[in-house]
Image (cartoon, rainbow, N blue to C red):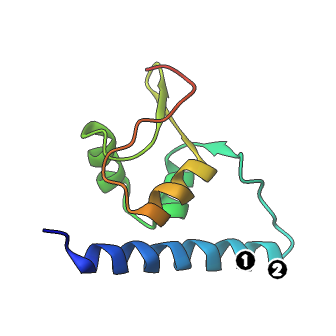
Amino acid sequence: MHNPFETINARLANLEALALEALSISRGHHVPATEVGGIELAQEITRLSKARIYALVSQRGICHSKRGNKLYFNRAELLDWVATGNRIQRSKGISE
């Protein structure tokens, strides 16, 4: 059975991400949607703790790429992940 609160939480998270992006643009700090970054970018977009992000990466529950010991996150993929409320999504690009 589908939990309606998951949909509400996903939409609220999406609205928060969009509001943060709009605030960034209004302050003149526009960041392109194709930006790739580390754990800090994932924290900024998802508003989750480092520990939670690492747990999601371990469970393959958040879109990411890995090269050696370094994790990479794509801003556009994270925004999509937040917007759709995906639990499991493999990212494309840099191989693990």
Q: Which residue is mark 2?
A: 26
Q: Which residue is mark 1?
A: 22
* Side (left or right) of 37 relative to 49: right
Query: Mark 2: which amino acid?
Result: Ser
Q: x, y (%) of residue 14? A: 51, 72
Q: Is residue 25 above or below residue 89?
A: below
Residue at the spot 39% in from the left edge and 42% down from the top edge = 89
Q: x, y (%) of residue 81? A: 46, 55
* Side (left or right) of 32 relative to 76: right
Q: x, y (%) of residue 49? A: 37, 61
* Side (left or right) of 34 relative to 63: right
Residue at the spot 38% in from the left edge and 47% down from the top edge = 62
Residue that protrudes farthest toward the front in the picture: 1
Residue that protrudes farthest toward the left in the picture: 1
Q: Is residue 22 above or below residue 59?
A: below
Local packing at callout 1 (Cα closer than 10 Å; few below 14, some 14-19, many 20+) is some
Residue 93 occupies quadrant: top right
* Side (left or right) of 24 relative to 39: right
The reply to whether callout 1 and callout 2 are in contact (CB within 8 Å) is yes
